[in-house]
Image (tube, helix red, strand yellow):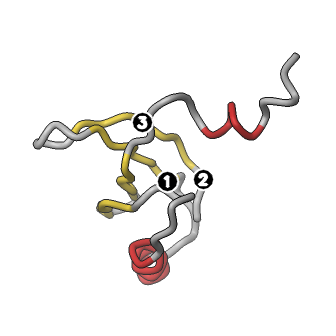
Amino acid sequence: GGFGGVYEGVLPDGRKVAVKQLESTGQGKKEFYAEVSILGTIHHWNLVKLLGFCSEGLNKLLVYEHMENSSLDKWIYQDCVE
């Protein structure tokens, strides 16, 4: 997947979501849709679920379920901080 910033959002039904704004890369529309299709079929308890996406021009957003209690980088690097 691509790199980009992640922001907290709220759906109209009140659910919190994580919205990932992908950085503009050379990835074409066909490749993006193929990636979204694959992400949408993966269901594993260690991975957040992809709820939706948006692709308009160069703007590409992925909408994931929101996970409470901290961020992934704090779990990954917890032993590095002293």
Q: Give the residue at the far top of this rendering.
A: 82
Binning the other alpha carbons within 10 Å of mark 1 as few (below 14), some (14 to 19) or many (20 upward) gives some
- Identify the secondary structure beneath mark 1: strand
Query: Picture coordinates of residue 4 (x, y %)?
Result: 55, 47
- The image quadrant where one finds the C terminus is top right
Amino acid type of the residue that numbered disc 1 sits on in the rendered structure: Leu
Name the residue located 49 percent from the left edge and 80 percent from the top edge.
31
* Among the two numbered marks 1 and 2 on one chain, the one whose residue lies closer to the N terminus: 2
What is the CA distance from the residue labelled 1 to the residue labelled 2?
6 Å
In the figure, 47 relative to 30: above or below?
above
Q: Nearer the viewer, residue 52 or 58?
A: 52
Residue 34: name its quadrant. bottom left
Report if the CB atoms under discs 1 and 2 are less than 8 Å apart: yes
- Identify the secondary structure beneath mark 2: loop
Amino acid type of the residue that numbered disc 3 sits on in the rendered structure: Tyr
Q: Which mark is residue 22?
A: 1
The residue to which callout 2 is attached is 3
What is the CA distance from the residue labelled 1 to the residue labelled 3?
11 Å
Query: Picture coordinates of residue 21 (x, y %)?
Result: 44, 48
Binning the other alpha carbons within 10 Å of mark 2 as few (below 14), some (14 to 19) or many (20 upward) gives few
